Image: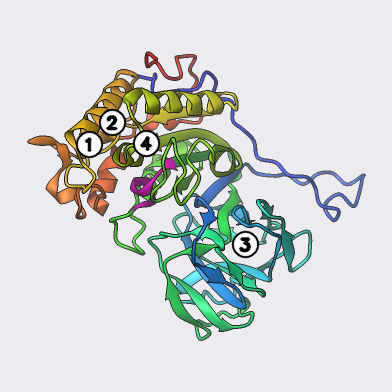
Amino acid sequence: MRRRSFLGATTALVAGGALASGAAAASATAAPAARGVRAGTWGAGAYGLAGVTFGGRTGRFIVRTSVGGTNPRVRLSNVAGAEPITVGPVHLGLHAGGGAVSPGTNRAVTFGGAATITIAAGAVVLGDAVDLTLPEQADLAISVHLGTPVANVTGHSIAAQRSYLSTDGDHGADESAAAFVTPISQWYLIDEVTVETGAAGGTVVCLGDSITDGVGSTSGTNRRWPDFLARRLLAAGGTFGPVGVVNAGISGNRVLWDGASPNSQARLDRDVLSHPGVYAVVLVEGINDIASGKAASADDLLAAYRQIGERLSLHGIRFSCGTITPWLGSASYTDEKEAIREAVNTAVRAAGGVDFDLAVRDPANPKQLRAEFDSGGGVHLTGAGYQAMADAVDLALLDPALTSTSSMIGVAP
């Protein structure tokens, strides 16, 4: 079995942790409660949403878990904010369809016991653990009230999922959908849900651009390639333990240059290393650098891949780099830019990387996607195409128990 796929030099699991709250540490003599392994069950890259103002009402944001578990915690983000914002109340429950919450499951999320929290500019905050069990592959409704409107709010623009905004006021405790009258396709302020899994496992992060974000898949169906990967890992069951998958894809994202969001190297700390239990990262990104002309050569991207891998290895996190999928049909396509993509892919293949390109390209014309995988425009895939990408990942490389001392990159500079 080939295990040179941009692997880190060690596989030590990075354990998530937090400072104890005053309430949790109130008794110096009390025996600590048994805790399970905490893993990310959902996540999204957060950045400033230009032109989007949110506040004076409640957002009910619908997300899908990957792994199941207990004691969920919600993270809120103000990473793009220029000033502090006060958020709350916040609620978490199981989604009942539309803007409704399943009766009896809606729980208040507190922050050190308080119903509201002020998030500093550029910061994130963690909610207290909620007494609720989340099933695997379950839809959640996270209701966030923001009293004062905030312009260019931190969030995630292309969710491939319908969420809802309420009429004026705080409606987070409502189980009914009556107040949630405005459908949206974005997430505001939320960027992570974690759970205790009760057994060894951890978190896999999928880092990338619109291909990872799931553009082209049908909204509300959870058919992004990380969704399919999560289901494969769950099906592997006892072989891997409970493994959560966090989708850190951002549409338009680049490896080398900022766009609407910071480049993937700049956001590595907040979108990968900040999640608990991360032991492996799978990257497929670079077409936006090539298409925009920001990557003048294959070496530009390969050097950046090496840096990402080096940084992850310092945290004991394995790195699997993927080949870049075809893009013939894009308005930005040129033969000169295509040559860069092909050179990058040659180097990644030589290092044993995940061959997403081979999995989805047209055998008759490898520069383009297979017709049934092209959602239109030559770049973004259909749900079937994203499933083919997930199927291309060798699950042995994502085994939490895997050990390797092989080269992290294996690509000549």
- Report, in whole angstroms, how far the alpha carbon at label 2 lies from the one at label 1: 7 Å
Residue 187 image offset from top left, x and y in percent: 50, 63
Badge 1: residue crowd in 10 Å (few <14, some 14–19, many ≥20):
many
**Labelled disc at residue 294:** 4
**Labelled disc at residue 355:** 2
Q: Residue at x 48, y 61 (%)?
A: 63
SS at mark 1 in the image: helix
Q: Residue at x 46, y 38 (%)?
A: 238
- For the rendered model, the colour scheme is rainbow
Disc on the earlier residue, 4 or 2? 4
SS at mark 3 in the image: loop
Disc on the earlier residue, 3 or 1? 3
Give the residue number, with chain letter if any, for mark 1: 359
Q: Nearer the viewer, mark 4 or mark 1?
A: 4
Q: Nearer the viewer, mark 4 or mark 2?
A: 4
What type is the residue that disc 3 sits on? Leu
Q: Residue at x 39, y 19 (%)?
A: 4
Disc on the earlier residue, 3 or 4? 3
Give the residue number, with chain letter if any, for mark 3: 132
What type is the residue that disc 4 sits on? Lys
Q: Is residue 213 magenta?
A: yes
Disc on the earlier residue, 3 or 2? 3
Q: Which residues are magenta?
A: 207-214
Placement of 285 over or under 397, stated as above or below: below
Q: Nearer the viewer, mark 3 or mark 1?
A: 1
The one nearer the camera, 223 or 209, is 209
Residue 406 image offset from top left, x and y in percent: 45, 14
Is residue 100 among the parts visible in the rendering?
Answer: no
